[in-house]
Amino acid sequence: MLAYAARRAGLGAFQVLAVAVLAFALVELLPGDAAVALAGDQPDPEAIARIRERMRLDEPALQRLGDWLGGLLTGDFGASLTTGRSVADILAGALEPTLILAGLTLALLLPLSVGLGVAAARRRGRWPDRLITTATVGLYSVPEFALAVLLVSAFAIGLQWLPPTAVGVPSLLAEPAVLVLPLLVLLARPICSIARLVRAGMIEALDSEYVAHARRAGVPERRVLLAHALPNALSPATAQIARTADWLLGGVIVVESVFVIPGLGTALVDAVNARDLPVVQGIAVVFGITTVLVNLLADLVAFRLAPRLELAR
Amino acid sequence: MTRNRAEFAAILALLAVPLGIALVGPLLPSTGAERTQPFDPAAPWPGTDHLGASVLDRLLDGGWGIVATAAAATALAFLAGFPIGLAAASTRRRWLDEILMRPFDLLLALPSLLLMLLLASIAPPTAWMLVLIVAFVNLPDIARIVRAAALEAAHHPVVDAMWLQGEGPWRIALTHTACSILPTVAADAGVRLVGAFYLVAAASFLGVGAGPESSDWAVMVDVNRGGIFLSPWAVVLPAALLVALSVGLNLLFDRLLSRREPA
């Protein structure tokens, strides 16, 4: 276990470094003169000069790369091109709503998707299974924003049960009603994929020799399901959680935009549209590191659940 | 069997509406309605959009772009990813395999929507650029699946036999390996198309990639959100078409897959 964890953590550290270098490389990849490209459609010489000075584009790229990596270690992400605020400040201000959304989604995701998967597997082939399977296949990659506006028009405008956006809400936790629709949208895709995997894993486990043996030995059905079949059914699903981190971050970007929640996703989209590259880089590094860490954790848990499966490539 | 056939018909019906509008819509003559005020409550159903134009006209014209972009991006991604995966699996030199595949491991560490936003932040906003970006984002997954499928075929005894008969490595890769993995790759293409469709729609909605003058269904949802209380159909109809297309494609490809390999 330790050797595997060390090797896997080494790969993770390398991926984090690569993400940081990739974010830095964005500036170098800009076509032509970076300062001119960033100054927008009507560049005036003053703005170009300001950008060049702020991003220190006159210095050699290698030296800037070193400073950028060193800055990341000390929490210095540079400053926004449009407002001049430090990127670390912008990130800190936008972190809370995103953390609340992602944390609540993850907390609800596991019990709901495992429950659905187990429920479908136990009633294999009958109508609850067919219903769950069709729903999870169909909703697998529905664009979140389309689902979101449909839910908003049904529940916020048609029925008027829930608020349509989070505009004017001081903190998400203060008004839980605001969170219902965003969480539903965020849960839709990952629930589908994990529930399908849990169902497939459970069906395989329930057909196995050891479950048959446990039943013959008189182990109560509840115990057979939860203590014998479920752990084995979960390990392929754990690997899928790595993908879920990907979808969750993507979903957060869209959901924050639809429900007007001032989190990291909104900050990223605004920065991309304003070509505010330092902010884009900072958020890319934060999202990239989060994904790498979640992947790492999922691989370690999957390895712990089923050590014979070597998941590192 | 009859129940399966009924389900299949239901899926096709679900797909027929959005696909029909997307493919045939641009050919239909416009309704010729005059521009009135934005979100006009007096306009005939389904009302007007944020510029006062008829929502119906916009709906008919707005599907083609998304479907074509997603299809073009998927095709381009396979065109690039298939040879890379095939070469990585067929080569007997380990370093070549590593050079071809290692960069993709790093790209996979980034969420796909984030990668797309990053590329869009430095690329000029044109429709072709969106095709390129979505293809690039899908490339790592495709190359890996092709490589995984080809590995088995490329180390089959048949390959050794061909090798001993003096066949060149290119000929083996193209005549034997490529042909034997085609069914797997074709099955995967459906999943990739749905994924590309998701990315294109999300990009349009977030206002990146496509130019400001474009008006597909995702852009309609975005720009008409402000008037959702006055004219809900301008948002609900394009969103419903996008959901129907996505759900329909998912169910269809899943059905085709499970028919190929019965559980």
Image (tube, rainbow, N blue to C red):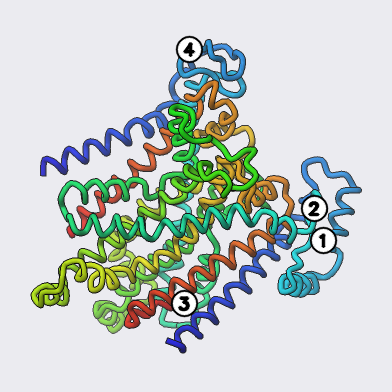
Residue nearest the viewer, comparing A152 with A145: A152
Q: CA distance from mark 3 to mark 2?
A: 41 Å
The amino acid type, in three-letter code, at marker 1 is Met
Instruction: Indicate the position of residue B192 as horizontal and vertical percent values.
Output: 40, 53
**Circles 3 and 2 in contact, beta carbons < 8 Å:** no
The amino acid type, in three-letter code, at marker 3 is Asp
Q: Quadrant of residue A210?
A: bottom left
- The secondary element bearing badge 1 is classed as loop
Instruction: Indicate the position of residue A302 as horizontal and vertical percent values.
Output: 38, 74
Query: Which mark, residue B44?
Result: 4
Residue beneath disc 3: B97
Pointer 4 local density, CA inside 10 Å: few below 14, some 14–19, many at least 20:
few
**Circles 2 and 1 in contact, beta carbons < 8 Å:** yes
Pointer 2 local density, CA inside 10 Å: few below 14, some 14–19, many at least 20:
many
Q: Earlier in the sequence, mark 4 or mark 3?
A: 4
Q: CA distance from mark 1 to mark 3?
A: 38 Å
Given the current orientation, which residue lies at the most extreme bottom position? A3
